[in-house]
Image (spheres, helix red, strand yellow):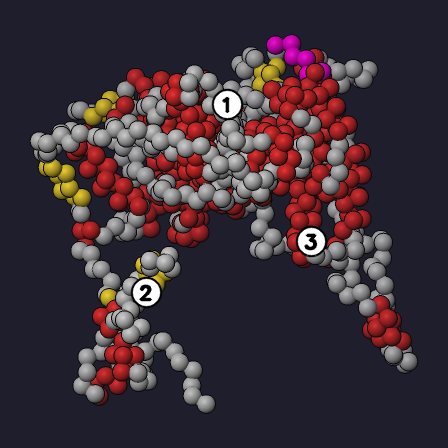
Amino acid sequence: MPGRRTFNGCWTCRSRKVKCDGQRESCARCEKAGLTCKGYDIKLSYYQSLTVSRDGQLIDSTKTPSGKPEKHTRRKMSLVQYPPESQYQTFAALNGSIDRLDTAVASGAPSYDIGPFRVYASTVQLPMASLPRVQTAPAKRRPSEPVHSQQSSVYRLQDLLNGEAGREELGGREPPLESDSYDANDAAEAPVYGAAELVAPSLMPLARLSIHAIKGPDYHINDQNIHHITYPTFFPNIDSDDWVPGVSEMEKLVRRGTGLTLAPLYVELLREFSSISAIFLKVKFAATENHPDFWTLYVKPLVDSVVLSEIASRDAEITDVSVDEVGSAGDKTRRWTRHLQQAIHGLVLSVAAFRHSTAAKFRIRHNTDIPGDIALSICLRKRALNMLNFHLDEYDDIHEAIPPFCHLKYDTQLLLAIVLQLEIDTYYNVFENLELLFSIGELVAQGPLKKCGNDVSICLVTMFEVMTTMYKSTQRINVYNYQMSESDMDRYDDLHDSYDLVRALGASRASTEPEPDDHDEPAIVGPTSSTQPLVDHTDYNDYTADVGVDPLATTLTPAQAVYAAYGVPQSLCVLLDHIVTLANHKRVFYSEKRYPRNFPKICSEFEEKLERWHVQWDLRNSTGKFKSRAHQAVWWYIQAVHAAIKIYFRRLIKSQASAAHVTEISRAVQEMQQDGAIRLRLPFWVGLMCANETNYETSKAVIAACFGEDLTYWRAQQVIIEMDKRRAHDPIIWMELVREWDIALFLG
């Protein structure tokens, strides 16, 4: 039997159809035969050329009349060898060259060469031909066809992007959301995806803002970009996100002369950042002087020290520190620390520039220029993200290289940078980098930083743990690489997947002679004893961290101050984290078609814990009345979050609707009477849970209570709109849309 053919030989032996010994760089068989070994590189060959015959069939155009292919099409073609100046290793280098080319064009340079690109002056102005728009009558769509045809996208999406111009083109009427030939009677038979192909018109400017944050303020938006940012699974990203911020935006902050001069805008941005608070803060006092929050007490001093260090070191002109230079361990540590501080500095200015602008009322019409503050914020965010990504990717290597006494400072600043990055990404609704941020942040938070007694570290770690819980509650897990701990599997599978009780009983009776007493072990012939802890028996109603804590007091520990600022007791956050883990485990079991016998029992025990949970914070006086109206508002705030967690549990664990809990949330929102001394803002996560059970009109008041200053959450709003569309013919929950669209939500 002849041996199996392989394609590992050199090209000379393969053309001779002889066996090659595979020796590199040139094979010995070619050397012995006195031939030139042509190597093992991959080479391209001509593809079969097809053409259409007169009768409408595809034929091979290279075949001779006898039917044999021409010999010249059998030769191999080598890969193109580009010169070194035309090779680019990264998109950043390519985009940098193109950016310099565009700058030369804008400055009116007569000629400019860089790599394979060049620009030259032209004295001939070629006229642009104006092509008339041809409109064809769209064919009637069958119920089985999606609505996203080329004709409909021209009318709908472009008219929405063009604003008033689209209305004039359509004769003064509003652009239709559906094709004129679409029959409304076929709506019930329409496919699920066909009903949700566009961003809602009210959310279109916010979607464009997210695209500009990813691809740059000068990026031209088209149909593909809008579809991709909403449905990344169905519409791929065809343009690179690795753009380089321009230098002109950075020059607005500092001026170089004989020394370093801070521009008035730079000072104004620093003042703006000192007056704002983080999105994490849901409970705020009107008089912050008497009730400073943890962000003001612990985190902002660290931010101020980093900013002042940048100014003092004369690097506030946004000049990047090189991290690739060779040097001693001490030099590398200083460069890495300075590099991370510059990332924090850029994030601080980016957040301040966004809040300094009128971002809440920001609307992009046509493809006009973005306001200066927004463009500056986008450029600063991109620059800081490029720096931070280096520390996220090289975290393990950096941690091994820097001295141990520098670990605490480095981890604290890295966690601060991650928190600030999540802050600005929430403003822009950019969540493409969430998985990396939370994975490295969790690694940092669970390391030595959690064990130290530093107040700043405790605040950052506690804050990040709450943010991680909220992110995981809406995260789409990968069931193929999701790993469970052995302790969880032991609790779910009490017999370790061994249900053959007869064989276990026979093995216990096989031995007739008793063994010595010191080796006596009882034979396990059935399920484990009920006295063994199958679940975590934590009493969430006796959580020592919550008992007797007044969230509105000024004498709180750093960890207590974080939970008080978020408005949710620690015991309820821990309970939600356990329920999220339980929901993820159910998803894995469902995909693997496994049914652990103890899993329903554990779920019912957690449901009982959730129903019996009550507030342990010290909100009432000795007579049972609330200490103040502010304490009463906080109590109703907690009740709304508690009811939303019940909806989450019933939907993901029990697959049941819970309209009664929506009534509880609505009542809690109405009872959150504020006397002006305190301002409360529910997490948008609560509004999403409420909108999942009822239509938008019913949950509108709850959703309104979740919006804050300069916050949009347009992706979550798009999910709510889509759930309303499908509610009549095919009800769907938010988690199914997250999996279907392959998006990420962070609503903490």
Q: Which residue is mark 3?
A: 589
Q: CA distance from mark 1 to mark 3?
A: 40 Å
Callout in the foreground (3, 2): 2
N-terminal label among 3 and 2 = 2
N-terminal label among 2 and 1 = 2
Position of residue 320 measured from the top left corner of the image (x, y, whole percent) = 29, 38
Q: Which residue is mark 1?
A: 202
- The answer to whether residue 124 is above or below residue 511 is above
Which residues, given as a range, are shown in magenta?
671-676
Q: Are marks 2 and 1 in contact (CB under 8 Å)?
A: no
Position of residue 385 measured from the top left corner of the image (x, y, whole percent) = 39, 38
**Classed neighbour count for the residue bearing mark 3: other residues with Cα under 10 Å, few (<14), some (14–19), many (≥20):** some
Looking at the image, the residue that sits furthest to the top is: 675
* 219 with respect to 518 (left or right): left
Q: Residue, x 32% and y 23% (percent of image)?
A: 369
* 77 with respect to 496 (left or right): left
* Secondary element at tag 3: helix
Q: Is residue 672 magenta?
A: yes
Foreground: 27 or 556?
27
Position of residue 57 measured from the top left corner of the image (x, y, whole percent) = 38, 59
- The answer to whether residue 382 is above or below residue 627 is below
* 535 with respect to 371 (left or right): right
Q: Is residue 227 magenta?
A: no
